[in-house]
Image (cartoon, rainbow, N blue to C red):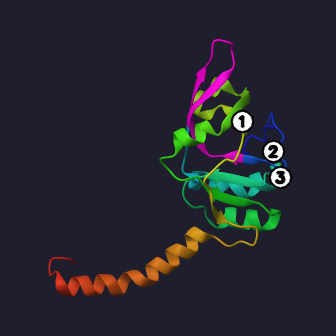
């Protein structure tokens, strides 16, 4: 995004997965997905709103929540962010029917742009919807509102907690 490089794939109406793949090259020259675990989406927060606008992507999959820029981008451009549960990397790999292309291989395996055909990919938890609802931020606010009374009660019972 910062370098204004054109993507080698058209993402309009498609999906991206913030992931750390392990890929094996087969004897026939094709690639096989061994494991594809989600990586923390929040590190892409500063790019995601513009990325959604520029690419037309409709589904962003990763791990953990996203912030206000992604929330706004999803609402403005009718996209969603979904969480793929950590620990399910091998399951995710079994849902990759074929690696159709591998772009930017010079960046190394984790940074290569793997173009995958998947079937029934999930489980996914929608964390940001097209209306701007952010499940993770809503849960944080709710949990934080409940936290202090619990801490105060524990402090009264356990003297060494400050």
Residue at coordinates 57% horizontally, 61% vertically from top-left?
65
Residue 40 in the magenta stretch? The answer is: no
Q: Is residue 12 left or right of residue 136?
A: right
CA separation in Å, label 1 and label 3 = 18 Å
Image quadrant in which you'd find residue 72: bottom right
Task: Depth check: give the residue in front, 125 or 115.
Answer: 125
Labels 1, 2: front one: 1
Residue at coordinates 30% horizontally, 81% vertically from top-left?
151
Find residue 154 and report its horizontal and vertical position in percent. Answer: 24, 82
Crowding at label 2, few (<14), some or many (≥20) Cα neighbours within 10 Å? some
What residue is shown with label 3?
Answer: 56
SS state under label 2 = loop
Q: Earlier in the sequence, mark 3 or mark 2?
A: 2
Residue 116 image label: 1
SS state under label 1 = strand
Residue 11 image label: 2
Q: Which residues are magenta?
A: 16-35
Find residue 142 and report its horizontal and vertical position in percent. Answer: 50, 80
Residue at coordinates 78% horizontally, 55% vertically from top-left?
58
Q: Earlier in the sequence, mark 1 or mark 2?
A: 2
């Amino acid at each position: 995004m910062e370098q204004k490089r054109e993507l080698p794939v058209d993402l309009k109406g498609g999906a991206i997965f913030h992931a750390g793949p392990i890929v094996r090259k087969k004897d026939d020259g094709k690639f096989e997905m061994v494991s594809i675990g989600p990586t923390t989406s929040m590190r892409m927060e500063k790019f995601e709103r513009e990325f959604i606008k520029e690419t037309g992507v409709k589904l962003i999959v990763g791990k953990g929540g996203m912030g206000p820029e992604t929330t706004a981008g999803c609402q403005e451009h009718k996209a969603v962010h979904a969480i793929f549960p950590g620990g399910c990397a091998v399951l995710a790999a079994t849902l990759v029917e074929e690696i159709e292309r591998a772009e930017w291989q010079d960046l190394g395996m984790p940074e290569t742009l793997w173009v995958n055909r998947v079937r029934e990919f999930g489980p996914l938890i929608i964390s940001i919807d097209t209306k701007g609802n952010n499940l993770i931020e809503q849960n944080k606010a709710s949990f934080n509102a409940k936290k202090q009374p619990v801490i105060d009660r524990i402090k009264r019972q356990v003297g060494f907690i400050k």
